[in-house]
Image (cartoon, rainbow, N blue to C red):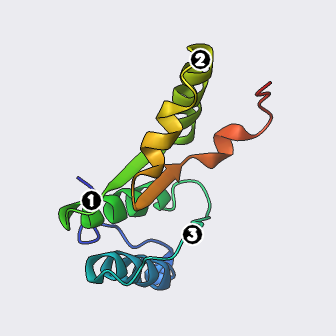
Amino acid sequence: MQTFDNYYYSNEGKNELTVSVIKKIAESYKNGSDTDSRLYTLYGPHNSGKTHLMKALFNEVSAFQIPAIYLKMDDFFEGLSGDLRANRNVIYFKSICENKLIIIDDIYWCVNKEFI
């Protein structure tokens, strides 16, 4: 299981600020102070630990019994397209939106995809 404690600090500690910010986001959920709709973007080179940090955030927030979901972008679109194919009026999307924290990983998956 990915946690902040078992995260490997690469790039000579240059990503310590990123980890600190993500820990503060987790803490704000624990304290109930993160009630606004917010969008956080985690960007970096391949193998820089983005997925690990997103899963660590998910695990930390989930431990506080806060509704959260972690999805990969291809799974997200597969669920949505399944709803559309079955004429279910985006039940999948609504179920995702019931969470206080929604983490979508591998957004690059959308590049050069046709969704029509």
- Which residue does the image show at 51% across and 76% down from the upper left? 36
Q: Which three-letter amino acid code belongs to the residue tagged 3?
A: Tyr
Q: Give the residue number, with chain letter if any, for mark 3.
A: 40
Q: Give the residue number, with chain letter if any, for mark 1.
A: 59
Q: CA distance from mark 3 to mark 1?
A: 17 Å
- Can you say whether 92 is above or below 46 in the image? above
Mark 2 Cα shell of 10 Å, populated few (<14), some (14-19), many (≥20): few
Q: Earlier in the sequence, mark 2 or mark 3?
A: 3
Q: Position of residue 61 (x, y in %)?
A: 29, 66
Residue 83 horizontal side relative to residue 13, left or right: right
Q: Nearer the viewer, mark 2 or mark 3?
A: 2
Q: CA distance from mark 2 to mark 3?
A: 31 Å
Q: Position of residue 72 (x, y in %)?
A: 50, 41
Q: Which three-letter amino acid code belongs to the residue tagged 1?
A: Asn
Q: CA distance from mark 1 to mark 2?
A: 33 Å
Q: Position of residue 10 (x, y in %)?
A: 45, 71
Q: Give the residue number, with chain letter if any, for mark 2.
A: 87
The quarter of the rendered structure image containing the C terminus is: top right
Seen from the viewer's position, the closer of residues 66 and 63 is 66
Residue 34 horizontal side relative to residue 43, left or right: left
Badge 2 element: loop
